[in-house]
Amino acid sequence: MTGMDEGHREGQRTRRIVVGVSGSLGSLAALNHAVEEARRTDAEVLAVLAWLPHGGAHGYRRAPCPPLLAAWREAATSRLREALGDAFDGAPSGVRFSSRTVRAETGHALVRTADRSDDLLVVGAGSGSRLRRGLRPAVAAYCVRHAACPVLAVPKPTLQREPETFRRRNVRHLPAAPAQGH
């Protein structure tokens, strides 16, 4: 697209699909869904990995250490590269694709990035565990409440849900569900 502003084509802005990526199976499912949607709609995909210094932003302000901050930033960049490698062996083919790391809480970073009304924000649906939700509110729920654009929460892949169901049954000493079709 030479001679045109980035994000514009024939006087119109290219639709973006912003997707949260952490490297988890749920985020990889969201990333795959975002790429398929981009292929279907000729949209641009922007993969975002949010990160914070260990101890959070407040902890870092109390005891700043620039070399540690640089190491955490590089670790986040490596994690994003690894996630893209796991999903596509690099970058997906057949779509306009870019990625970035953002130093912020995940939900805030995604909502701030997907700031156009015609964007689509895609996130993994995350964990259903009450303990995890209590300790760290769900990113998907935050995005739905605060985003200026539509939000699509992609459920966990079956391969991730089944072992978690078995683990919960095992902790409660329940028998494994019988195989269906037998």
Image (cartoon, rainbow, N blue to C red):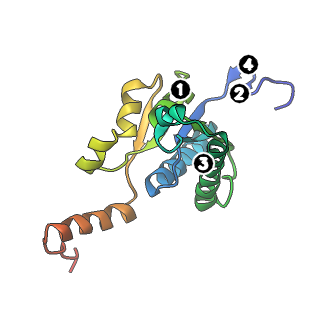
Residue neighbourhood size for the residue with mark 4, other residues' Cα within 10 Å, grouped as few (<14), some (14–19), many (≥20): few
Q: Residue furthest front?
A: 63
At 73% from the left edge and 18% from the top edge, which residue is drawn? Answer: 11
Query: Regarding mark 1 in the picture, which secondary structure is present there?
Result: helix
The disc placed on residue 121 is none
Report how far apart the C-alphas of labels 3 and 2 lie in the structure. 26 Å
Check disc 4 and report the residue beneath it: 11
Query: Regarding mark 2 in the picture, which secondary structure is present there?
Result: loop
Position of residue 118 measured from the top left corner of the image (x, y, whole percent): 54, 24
Report how far apart the C-alphas of labels 4 and 3 lie in the structure. 35 Å
Q: Residue furthest top?
A: 11
Q: Is residue 48 in view?
A: yes
Check disc 1 and report the residue beneath it: 112
Q: Which of marks 1 and 2 is in front?
A: 1
Residue neighbourhood size for the residue with mark 1, other residues' Cα within 10 Å, grouped as few (<14), some (14–19), many (≥20): some
Position of residue 116 measured from the top left corner of the image (x, y, whole percent): 56, 22
At 56% from the left edge and 48% from the top edge, which residue is drawn? Answer: 36
Which quarter of the image is occupied by the N terminus? Answer: top right
> The disc labelled 3 sits on which kind of residue?
Ala
Report how far apart the C-alphas of labels 4 and 1 lie in the structure. 24 Å
Query: Regarding mark 3 in the picture, which secondary structure is present there?
Result: helix
Q: Which of marks 3 and 2 is in front?
A: 3
At 25% from the left edge and 49% from the top edge, which residue is drawn? Answer: 131
Residue neighbourhood size for the residue with mark 2, other residues' Cα within 10 Å, grouped as few (<14), some (14–19), many (≥20): some
Check disc 2 and report the residue beneath it: 7
